[in-house]
Structure formats: C-alpha cells, structure tokens
C-alpha cells in the first residue's frame, strides 16, 4: 500500500518537474498553454497528496478552468507564436555568455543555500498549528484555514482583495474590453450545456462558500467557480448590459475590498484594533465578508478575461467601421 | 481494495504521462486540446480512487469541480475567435471582426 | 411558452436545485441559510436563460427502457473502440454520413446529438436543419441510428416526423 | 477478509483499466482528430463509469452514491458536448476526415 503511494508521489513529482521544464521551454505558445492546463491538473493532485485540500480546491478551479480560458483568450489577443518570437539582435560574445554564466552561477548557489537551510531546520516543524488550535474557539468558524485567512490574519486577505482590484485597474488602463469570442451562431448543444452547467456552478459555489466555515472551501474558491460561470455565459454570447457597466460594475468589483475596509474601520472605532471581531459576532461577520468577497472575486476574475475597461457607448469607432467596410 | 485502487490510480497517472506525447507532438492545436480533455476525465477517476483509498471525502469535491470545469477551457478553445483550428498557430491580425 | 408550462418548469427546476443542494451539503441544517440564497440565485439565472421550446416531459416508461439500453450501448461502444485501439493493424474505415433526422428540433434532438457520440462507432459532427452529420469509425458497421432515434422519441414521449 | 462486494468492486476497478489505457492509445495511435474524439468520448467515459460503479458499491451512504452518479453524468454530458463542438469546428474549418487509402 505505502509502496504504491510512494510510487504515485514519485511519478507525480517527476511529471510536474518535466512538465514545468517543457512548458517553459516551449516556443509554440499554444502548446505551452495546454501543458500549463495539464500542469494545473497534476498540481491539484499534488496539493491533495500534501494534505492541503483548500489549495487543491483552488488550484483545481483556477488551473482546470480559469487559467486555461484566460490564457487562450490572451493568446487570441496577442496574435501568434510567430509574432512573439524575438527578432535576431547582434550581440557581443560577452552578452551571449552572460545568461549561461548567470544561470550557471546563480542556480547552484541558490540550491546550496536552500540545502544548507533545509538541513538546519528542525525535523518536526509544527509551524503555527498549535497556536491556531488554541485560539480556534474564539474565531467564529471551525475550520483552521478559514480562521487564519479571515480572522487571525484577516489583513492578509484584505490586502489580497486590494491586489486583485489593483490588477484589474491596471488591466483597465491598458486597453478597452473586447468580446474575445467568435460571433458566429452559437451551437445548440453549447446552449444546452450552459443551461445545465450555469445553475450547477452557482450551487457548487454556494456549497463551497458555506462549507468554508467547517472544512476546505471559502470565498476564493467559490468566487473562482462563479467566475467560471460568468466566463461560460460570455462564451455563450452573453454580455454585460450597457446599464450595468457603470457604477454597478464598479461596486461589484470593489465590494469585497470595501466590506473588509468597513469592518476594519468599525472594529478600529470600537476596540482600537482593526479587524478584531467581537467574539459573538465573528461567525456572522466572516460570512458577510466572505459573501462580498466571493462576488468581488468572481467579477474581478471575469473582468480580467474581458481584458480592458468597459466601453459604455455602442458607437463603433473609426477602426471598426473601416474593418467592416 | 485500497491497495488495488492505489495501484490503478498509479497506472492512470502513467496514462496521463503517455498522453503528454500527444500534447507535445500535436500537430494541430485541436489535437493538443483533446489530450487536455482526456486528462480531465482521467484526473476525475484518479481523484475518486485516491479519495476512496485514503478515506478523504474532500477528493470527491475536487473531482466534482474538475467534472464541472474541464469543459470550460475546451469550450473557450472552440469559441475563441481565430482563423483555423487545424493549422499551427498563425497570426490572427487579419481576421475580419 | 404558456403560463402553465412556465410554472411547471419553475417548479421542476426548484425541486432539482433543492435536491442538489441537499446532495452537496448532506442535509446539514445550518447550510440552508446560504442554501436558500444560492438556490434562489441559481433559479433566477436558470429562468433568465432562453428556455427550450417546450417544457421537458419525460415518459417514466421511456426512461426505464432507455437507461439499460444506454448503459449496454455505452459498454459496447467502449469495448468497440478499445478493441480497435489495441489491434496492431488499426481496423478503422472512417466515413462521414448524413442522417435525415426525424426528431423535431429542441431538447430531444440535443439529447440525441449527445448520446450519438457515446454509442458504438458514431460521433455527431454537425447538425443542420434536418440532417445529422455523423462520423463513423467503420463504415461497414451499422450505426443503428434509427433505433436510437426511436428510443429517444420514446424517452421524451414524442412521435417521430414522417420522412419526406 | 474480502467480502463478495469487495471482490465485485475490485473486479470493476480492474476492468476500468483497459478502457483508460485504450483511450490514451487511441489518442496516440488513431490517424486523425475525429477518430481520436471517438476514443476520448467512449473509452474514457466507460472507464470512469466502471470506477464510479465500483465506488458506489463501497459507498457509506445514498448521498455518496448520488454524488458519484452526478459526477459521472457531468463528465458524460460535458465530454459528449465538447466532442461535438470540436468535431463541428474542425468540419467547418475544412478538415477532411482521414480515409483508409
């Protein structure tokens, strides 16, 4: 039994390393994307083998569904693998030598440092497990991961929401949103799949969100599932109605961040410490923040897919007219 | 039973490793995408078997998520605007909008 | 769609989603707060999508007959394709055929489309107004499409159109 | 001590293997995209079906049985739809099916 398990883990690690190498070395960008999707799949398995189901769940959702879709759309906008190949530039011999030299010197030294550190580490690193377990009863949730993410170190998650928001803001500053999908007739089989899958995605997202209080799950995984639902709807030709692209969209994108901010402000005013929840309210507060964060994350990820700021007016630009002419 | 499921899971992982040859060789993007689709189904089976062997019910949830989501990447591939799914990737600049 | 159909569809969907929620959470009593909101959202989204032409009516007898048929055919399909993959000289003789459909457009047709791909030697490649384009692994082998179409018609309790 | 049910689900799990292997073999050996789609939709889904059936026999509760069934059905429907969409797109792009020369 343990023999098969060891073999499984060994093969998994080997595959992950090979895949990582091949996908980074791949000149064909499409091939790299498919390799990346496969990599995500195996990585989710690896997290499960490492007994980190929360991360496995997130990796499964992000890796299997969203990153693949995001990268495919990105490649479509980028153009081709051919165009991305760098132009041949004249280089001096020293310049040509610099990369192999740097890599050849840096990698072994980093590896040596890591190895030395590894051997000096204590054998049993319990980390903060005991500390978390000792305070879990005051957290308002039963699952230690959620307790850390949303209560003990809630500021981490708060700032992560900010990072996501900033990421989308920078995407908005680059370009205007374009519908990345073919505009031909949508096959009836796809519409049927959507009718079936969309409500299911919502249900599973709700399930994963509510389970975060007792087990693996939570706002990030649920939000990513909802984002997959939004992407599926976009694939089936749905678009955000023009009336919803203004304030409403911005509220949806930022509600996770602002709810957190509000909670921080209120707790600061009440107790002098931001994000220190009163114990009897902690459970409900965490749920409230998680719901807001779920919606925010869903819309933020889907906005990243749109790849630019919303264009409220339907008026075609000069370039569009020239193209359609 | 548990050791049998583990051994079968191991062999399934090996079939994924073999299938990677199709991703590497292509020749068309569609062929590569097909392989990813196959990995999704195989991964669901591996998860169910591992979940049974190690008594961790959360594996079923991850399997459910895989079952829901492998289609999304494949559908994106089918629906994205591009010239020709058969040819190796080409410049899409001159595609009419 | 008629009003009665609309109510019927809403009730069907609501029951299905409640069942699914129960299935996912294992009927945990504390889960129904989030559950109510989630099921409501799922129902709202499902109803806002363009509905199929007519409410789904499945004949219980047809279903009882269809399940064993489908399982048996999937087994045959899997064995067939596995045998071809294992045989060294690769016994394939593919062809595209056009099959005139007798099922009316709608859910039943999509259902047929999806089942065709799971049955022995057939893959639904395209569908136009009244023909189904099917890819065969072996053109010598009878694809048994007529039989499948009749079974699907029985499942959805509809009668097949006459062939022109 | 192995019960009859254990024996039965063990046999089912073993029986699923040749189909998964056939799916991969088909993906590697079949001459064109359409034939590979056949291998993908039929062999692998049957393999998964056998695994699901085996684990259903071992399930602790009806809930688990239904969950497993749900997963299999989802994979079936998604697989069949994706296969159809890919074949349709390939046909539209003018990819001719391989014929025995």
Image (cartoon, rainbow, N blue to C red):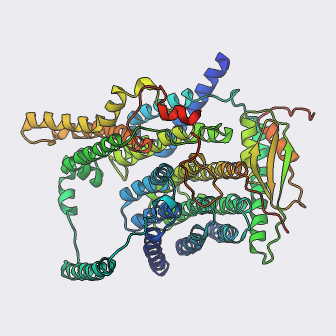
Percent coordinates x, y for residue A177 in the rendering: 43, 38
Q: How many marks?
A: 0
Tell me what residue is drawn at x 58 percent, y 26 percent. Answer: C10
Between B31 and A131, the residue placed more toward the observer is B31
Q: Residue at x 26, y 41 (%)?
A: A286
Position of residue B85 in the picture relative to residue A31 (left or right)? right
**Residue D31 falls in image quadrant:** bottom right
* Residue A36 place in picture, x, y as percent: 47, 62
* Image quadrant in which the N terminus of chain C is located: top right
Residue at the limit of the structure toward the right, as seen here: C164
Q: Is residue A111 left or right of residue D2?
A: left
Residue positioned 36% across, 62% down in the render:
A52
Residue C26 appears in the picture as rendered: no
Residue lying furthest top in this view? Answer: C3
- Quarter-wise, where is residue C141 in the image? bottom right
Can the viewer see residue A312 in this picture? yes
Query: Which residue is drawn at the image coordinates 82% and 41% (left, top)?
Result: C131
* On screen, residue A257 above or below C6: below
B19 to the left or right of A259? right
């Amino acid at each position: 039994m343990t023999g098969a398990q060891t073999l499984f883990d060994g093969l998994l690690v080997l595959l992950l390393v090979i895949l990582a190498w091949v996908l980074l070395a791949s000149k064909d960008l499409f091939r790299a994307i498919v390799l990346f999707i496969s990599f995500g799949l195996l990585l989710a398995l690896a997290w499960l083998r490492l007994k980190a189901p929360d991360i496995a769940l997130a990796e499964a959702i992000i890796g299997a569904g969203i990153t693949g879709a995001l990268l495919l759309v990105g490649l479509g906008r980028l153009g081709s693998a051919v165009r991305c190949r760098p132009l041949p530039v004249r280089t001096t011999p020293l310049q040509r030598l610099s990369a192999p030299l740097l890599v050849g010197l840096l990698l072994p030294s980093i590896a040596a440092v890591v190895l030395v550190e590894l051997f000096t580490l204590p054998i049993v690193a319990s980390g903060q497990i005991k500390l978390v377990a000792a305070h879990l009863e005051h957290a308002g949730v039963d699952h230690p991961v959620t307790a850390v993410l949303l209560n003990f170190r809630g500021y981490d998650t708060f700032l992560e929401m900010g990072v996501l928001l900033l990421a989308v803001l920078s995407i908005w500053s680059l370009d205007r949103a374009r519908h990345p999908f073919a505009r031909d007739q949508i096959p009836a089989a796809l519409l049927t799949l959507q009718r079936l899958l969309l409500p299911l995605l919502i249900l599973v997202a709700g399930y994963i969100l509510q389970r975060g209080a007792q087990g693996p799950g939570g706002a990030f995984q649920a939000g990513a599932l909802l984002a997959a639902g939004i992407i599926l709807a976009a694939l089936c030709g749905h678009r955000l109605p023009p009336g919803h692209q203004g304030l409403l969209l911005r509220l949806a994108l930022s509600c996770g961040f602002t709810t957190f901010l509000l909670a921080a402000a209120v707790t600061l005013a009440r107790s002098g410490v931001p994000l220190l929840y009163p114990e009897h309210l902690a459970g409900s507060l965490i749920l409230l923040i998680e719901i807001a964060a779920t919606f925010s994350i869903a819309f933020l990820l889907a906005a990243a897919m749109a790849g630019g700021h919303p264009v409220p007016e339907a008026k075609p630009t000069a370039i569009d007219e020239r193209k359609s002419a | 039973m548990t050791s049998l499921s583990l051994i079968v899971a191991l062999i399934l992982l090996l079939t994924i490793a073999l299938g990677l040859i199709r991703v590497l060789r292509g020749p068309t993007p569609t062929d590569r995408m097909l392989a990813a689709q196959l990995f999704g189904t195989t991964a669901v089976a591996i998860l169910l078997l591992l979940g049974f062997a190690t008594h961790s019910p959360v594996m079923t949830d991850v399997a459910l998520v895989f079952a829901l989501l492998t289609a999304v990447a494949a559908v994106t591939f089918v629906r994205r605007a591009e010239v020709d799914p058969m040819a190796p990737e080409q410049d899409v600049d001159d595609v009419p909008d | 769609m008629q009003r009665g159909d609309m109510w019927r569809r809403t009730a069907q969907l609501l029951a299905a989603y409640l069942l699914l929620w129960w299935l996912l959470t294992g009927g945990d009593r504390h889960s129904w707060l989030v559950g109510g909101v989630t099921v409501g959202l799922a129902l709202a989204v499902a109803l806002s999508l363009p509905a199929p032409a007519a409410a789904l009516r499945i004949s219980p007898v047809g279903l009882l007959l269809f399940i064993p048929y489908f399982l048996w055919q999937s087994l045959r399909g899997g064995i067939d394709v596995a045998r071809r993959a294992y045989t060294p000289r690769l016994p394939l003789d593919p062809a595209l055929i056009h099959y005139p459909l007798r099922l009316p457009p709608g859910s039943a047709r999509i259902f047929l489309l999806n089942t065709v791909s799971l049955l022995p030697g057939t893959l639904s490649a395209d569908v136009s107004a009244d023909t189904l384009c099917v890819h065969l692994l072996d053109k010598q082998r009878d694809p048994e499409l007529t039989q499948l179409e009749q079974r699907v018609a029985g499942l959805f309790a509809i009668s097949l159109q006459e062939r022109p | 001590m192995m019960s009859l049910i254990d024996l039965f689900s063990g046999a089912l799990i073993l029986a699923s293997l040749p189909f998964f292997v056939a799916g991969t073999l088909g993906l590697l050996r079949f001459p064109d995209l359409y034939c590979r789609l056949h291998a993908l939709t039929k062999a692998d889904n049957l393999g998964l079906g056998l695994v699901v059936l085996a684990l259903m026999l071992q399930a602790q509760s009806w809930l688990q049985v239904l969950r497993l069934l749900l997963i299999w059905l989802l994979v079936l429907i998604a697989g069949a739809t994706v296969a159809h969409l890919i074949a349709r797109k390939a046909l539209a792009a003018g990819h001719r099916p391989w014929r025995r020369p």
